[in-house]
Amino acid sequence: MYNNLGVNYVNRAINAISTAEFPYALPMEIDFNSRLYSTTGSGTKGDDQLGWEKNEKIINEWLTQAKAYFEEAIKIDENYLKANNNLNAQ
């Protein structure tokens, strides 16, 4: 869950920046498997592509929140590959 929240915040930040300013794709991974079935274990200002300068504050907030979610997922399972990969891709 925290991994997927983190991916959403990274995507939200990237979508607020034009492709001219950030022409890269990041290798983020959504986890479609739910641990619920495992036996072991808003509209926010800045959503439009107004560019980095106009959205810098909210973009940094989203990326900080994404990092916190990835770190929370890793606290729960330090071997969680997707969360580790996503944290390192930022």
Image (tube, rainbow, N blue to C red):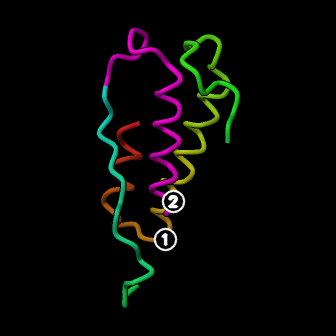
The image quadrant that residue 90 belongs to is top left
The 10 Å Cα crowd at callout 2, few under 14, some 14 to 19, many 20 or more, is some
Per the image, label 1 sits on a secondary structure element best described as helix
Within the magenta stretch, is there residue 12?
Answer: yes
Q: Position of residue 8 (x, y in %)?
A: 49, 45
Q: Position of residue 34 (x, y in %)?
A: 40, 73
Residue at x 41%, y 46% (from the top left corner): 87
Mark 2–mark 1 Cα distance, whole angstroms, equals: 10 Å
Per the image, label 2 sits on a secondary structure element best described as helix
Residue at x 53%, y 23% (from the top left corner): 16
6 up-or-down from 19: above or below? below
Residue sticking out furthest to the bottom: 39
Location of mark 1 (residue): 76
Q: Position of residue 30 (x, y in %)?
A: 36, 53
Q: Amino acid at mark 1?
A: Ile
Q: Is residue 75 left or right of residue 40?
A: right
Location of mark 2 (residue): 2
Label drawn at residue 29: none
First in residue order: circle 2 vs circle 1: 2
Give the magenta part as a residue range: 1-24
90 up-or-down from 31: above or below? above
Residue at x 31%, y 29% (from the top left corner): 25
